[in-house]
Image (cartoon, rainbow, N blue to C red):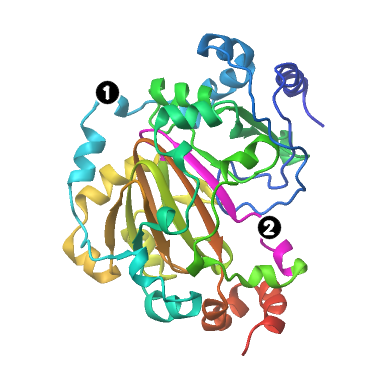
Amino acid sequence: ALNQKELELARQIAEEDEEIEIEVNLELESSEDETEYSQPTSSPRLEPTELSIDELCIKHKSSLDILKDSPKHSHSQRNLAADNQLIPSLFMKQVCPSTIVRLAAQDIVALDGPAFFKRYDNAPAILQGIAELEQWEHQNWTSLSAFLTRYGHVPCKVTELASPLGMGKPLPIRIPLRLYHHYASSNLADFPFYVFERELEGDRQLLTDWYKVPRWFQEDVFDTDPDLRMLFPRYKYAVIGGNRTGSNFHTDPCFTCAWNTLLTGRKKWVLAPPTSSEAFKQDMKIQQTSGKENQPPLYWWQDAYAKMSPDVIERWGLVEVIQEPGDTIFVPSGWWHCVLNEGFTTAVTQNFLPRAAASKLVKQIQGADPELYSALLPVLDV
């Protein structure tokens, strides 16, 4: 049961007319490792009521108070926001080789999915021109004003209230994207909240209903059987953040690959080939416990990236790349990656596991996840 304070917060949030939805994972705040499932509950509203920022702040005061009260996401121990040149300087700095191949989508249109993976599954790649080739209706994502006009009313999760003593289900805290943009533009935190929305029902359908999956990334063994899909039900995300947001070093769940298309802002990526070595984690100064990030992502760029030695970079095969608007990055299964955002960034991304990748990794899957291995075996040619 919730304690009295949390019950009062829940009541206030309900009165603010926010969506209260339930999530299964009790530990994660915004990690892509979360894998819960629910059915769509409503259709999107196409004609939202316009409120001023001041009115939105009043309407969602309880939620904003929760954000302000988060020790992890409200502190400014290093006062990073005061240095306007910090993030631009990190984007200008090149520490790792920038050898990631860039492909014009039009030049590889003759390749199907299996042919693409046969040629490019050993390293990340940047694909350019996918939106135009696939005729995405992405005009509402290409400028901040268009984005906020179309999606400003859409409520997205920025955090959640954990149940006391780890019992019960956490309460998602959602605010409209126009209010999130105001927060992202004005907060001074070293580790601001970052929207990584996977609950794409109701109004949030609007965030992903305008594109189709790029032709090279449509095959996914999780789609071959409903029971298999239930092992990885959440695989599509809208990712929205401001300066100082990003992600610490991690690999994607369930041995999946990923594609990520950036619409606005810029992202800087550092990536490393698959490894389970503890020495790698020590060299990368990876500090994670139970899926939770212990420090602001920008600290890693200051403390580790900027001071990384050539020996460490060569030992682990690190590469880096800057993703510009319109770029789609492909991240193969098992590749470590971390990301730093510059400006107000909007992106869409999906995880998937093509048959060729699953067959190649079947022995690793067997050792690491016997349940997934048993479910995959009937659909693989092994």
**Does 230 sit above or below residue 43?**
below
The image shows residue 251 at horizontal and vertical percentages of 47, 61
Name the quadrant of the C terminus: bottom right
The image shows residue 105 at horizontal and vertical percentages of 37, 64
**Does 84 sit above or below residue 282?**
above
Q: Residue at x 72, y 76 (%)?
A: 375
The one of 325 and 33 positioned closer to us in this rendering: 325
Name the quadrant of the N terminus: top right
Q: Residue at x 41, y 76 (%)?
A: 110
Q: Which residue is mark 1?
A: 82
The one of 69 and 230 positioned closer to us in this rendering: 230
Left or right of 123 on screen, residue 163? right
Q: Quadrant of residue 49?
A: top right
Residue type (three-letter) at the residue carrying disc 2: Pro
The outermost residue toward the bottom is: 382
In the image, the segment drawn in magenta is 228-245
Q: Give me the disc on residue 269.
A: none
Left or right of 167 on screen, residue 152? left
The image shows residue 250 at horizontal and vertical percentages of 45, 57
Which secondary structure, mark 1? helix
* Circle 2 Cα neighbour tier, 10 Å, few/some/many (<14 / 14–19 / ≥20): some
Residue type (three-letter) at the residue carrying disc 1: Ala
Q: Which residue is mark 2?
A: 233
> Can residue 195 be found in the magenta stretch?
no
Left or right of 215 on screen, residue 171? right
